[in-house]
Structures are given as structure tokens and as C-alpha cells.
Image: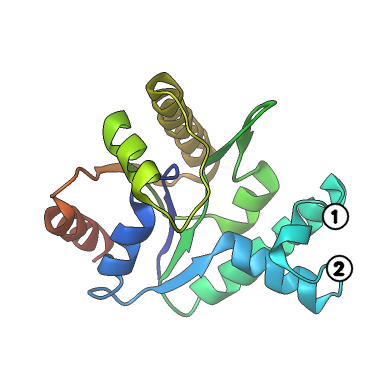
Amino acid sequence: MKLVVLTGIPGSGSTTILNKTLEEVDYLHLNYGDIMTEIAIEEKIVNDRDELRKLPAETQKVIQEKAAKKIKEQSETENVIVDTHCTISTPAGFLPGLPEWVLRELQPDLFILVEANHDEIIYRRLSDDTRSRDIEKAKNIKLHQEMNRAASMAYATLTGATVKIIENHDNHLDSTVSKMVDLLK
């Protein structure tokens, strides 16, 4: 069984690629934030996902670790692809999306980073009326993708996983999905 972590900055198209890829491969799709929310609701710590980020950091860490254990357990009987953030851009700087205690539990086999050109990402963000996204300059988008690359290699160093970058350019969805399918088979 494989445990794969899929990441991409907002507007990279990682969700679109994942949804199309899942039509062709037999993987269980788990969203890390959804699993954390389910655990926190079950334990009556929060009522919804928005309350999760307002919890004390120590409480969030405990929930993160429990989510990692739950995901790892599911990966023992089926192939799992975890949709999450490699890094999170905050006003205080970049926050690792997969801290050491999460990686220790997960022990993924592969990290996939979905990337696109900064102008494609800007256009996608502006065109997506289903989300409320911050407007970022091209240099900040480039930096965020560079931080994801650096973080994913650090994560791979801690886990022994491999890192694959898949480029998702406009008007190439089918070939991008094909690359992803080949990688997951």
C-alpha cells in the first residue's frame, strides 16, 4: 500500500488534478484538515472547521497527531492520497504544513508538489469566485512555491520518501493528469 501526500499552493490546480486523477486510480482521498475537524468535533472540542484554527497551539498539535495516526491506519489496508498544505503563508512567515510529529506518524512514500507559473496562478485565483483568496504579487507566489520545494525535501529527509514535482499549465490538464496517474500506478 502507498501513502502519498499531495500539495500545491492555492491556484496551482492541485484539487482539479487530484479529482480527475481519482477517476483513474484506486486511492482513498483524505483531506488532512477534514480529518482534524472530524476528530475535534467527535471529541467535542469544536463545532466546525473554522473553530479549529482558534484552538491553543498545543491542542492543535494533539489533534494533528491523532489525524496522522488515523490516516496511517487507513493506509495499511488501501492506497491513500492525503491532500494538505506543504507550507502555509502567514503574516508572520511560512508555517510548515507537516511538522515533525505528523511526519513521524504518517511516514509517507511520496510527496507530490503541483506547481504552475505565477501568471497562471494569479489568473486562476482571480477567476475562482467560489473562494476568497488573497491577491499576491508574482514574486510572493514564486517564493511560496520555492518554500514548498525546500520543505518537501526536508520532509523527505525525515521520512525517506521521494519528491515529485508535477507542472500544471493551462490547457494541459489531460497530460498533467496522465503524468499523475502514471506516477501513482
Q: Quarter holding the C terminus?
A: bottom left
> What residue is drawn where x is 26% and y is 66%?
21
Q: For mark 2, give the secondary structure.
A: loop
> What residue appears at the point 59 percent right and 44 percent down from the top-left corner?
97
Q: 136 left or right of 165?
A: right
54 left or right, relative to 103: right
Residue 91: x and y in percent read: 67, 28
Quarter of the image with the N terminus is bottom left
Describe residue 1's horizontal placement relative to residue 94 as left or right. left
SS class of the residue under badge 1? helix
In the foreground, 87 or 112: 87
Q: Is residue 178 visible?
A: yes
- Using the image as rendered, state which of residue 93 and residue 29 is in the foreground: 93
Q: For mark 2, what is the residue?
A: 45
* Residue for badge 1: 59
> Which amino acid does the dot numbered 2 rest on?
Ile
